[in-house]
Image (tube, rainbow, N blue to C red):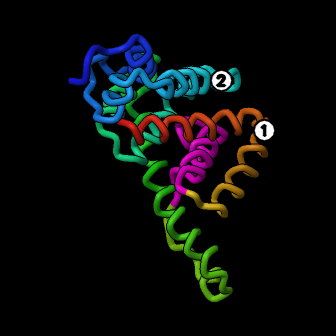
Amino acid sequence: MFGTVSETKKNLLAEINLPADFESVFLNRLNAADHRYIKDLKINLSNSLKAQTLNEKEAVLIALSIAINEKATDLIASLEESAKAKGVEEKELLEVASCVSLMNANNILYRFRHFMNKDSYTNIPAGIRMSIMMTPVLGKEFFELLSLVISAVNGCELCVTSHEASVKSHGASEQRIFDAVRLGAVVKSVITLL
C-alpha cells in the first residue's frame, strides 16, 4: 500500500461503492503523490452520477453498463450491489448485460460497414437478432439511451447516430442524452485507473 488513503480517494471509491482500501496501482500512486487529478476525477464522477436528467437508478445502470462493457469485475460487483439497493430487479440487471452484449456485436458490425463504405456490405442483412430491443423491461427510451452510451464508448458512429435519433423520438432531451454519454465517459475514465 502506498501511504494513507486520502479522503478524496475514499470519496471517489465510495461514489462507485468500492471499499476505501480498494487496491489500484494508479489510484494508490496518485494518492501517495497527493495528486490533484483524484479530486478532479471524484468531482467529475459525482457530478455525472447526479445529473438532473438521470435518476439514481438510471445513473447506476449506465455506470454498470460501462463496467460490463470494460470487463471491470470489481466495479461490476459493486455497482450491481448499489443497483439492488436502489430497487433494481435481477431482470433489469440482466437486460443491461444483454444490451451491452448486443451493442458490442452491432458496434463491430456497423463500424466495419462504415469503415468499408461499400454498398455490397451495407446491403447485406445484418443477420443479428435483436428481439430484446422490441419490448425491453427497462422501457424503450432508456434501453435506447443505454445503447447510445455503449455505442459512444465503443466508437460506433452509425450506432450513435441511430440511437440518438431513436432516444429523441421517445422524448429524451439533448441534455439527457449528453448527461448519459458524459456519465459513460467518466466511468470509463475511472475504470482506466482501476
Secondary structure of the residue carrying tag 2 is: loop
Q: Residue furthest top?
A: 7
> What residue span does the magenta drawing correspond to?
130-154
Q: Taking the image as drawn, is residue 51 in sight?
A: yes
Q: Residues within 10 Å of mark 2 (few under 14, many from 20)?
A: some
Left or right of 151 on screen, residue 93:
left
Residue plotted at (78% across, 46% down): 169
Our reading of the magenta stretch's main secondary structure is helix
Horizontally, is 96 left or right of 26 in the view? right
Give the structural element (helix, strand or loop) at label 1: helix
Residue 153 pos. (x, y %): 55, 50
Amino acid type of the residue that numbered disc 2 sits on in the rendered structure? Ala
Q: Which residue is pictured at 51% across the width and 50% down the height?
A: 132
Q: Is residue 82 visible?
A: no
Instruction: Write down the residue under mark 2.
Output: 51
**Quarter placement of the C terminus:** top left
Residue 107 in the image: above or below residue 13: below
Identify the disc placed on residue 174. 1
Name which residue type carries label 1.
Glu
Q: Quadrant of the N terminus?
A: top left
- Is residue 120 positioned above or below 126 on the image? below
Residue at point 49% right, 35% down?
Answer: 187
Q: Is residue 78 magenta?
A: no
Instruction: Establish if 117 lies above or below 79.
Output: below
At x 49%, y 34%, the residue is 63
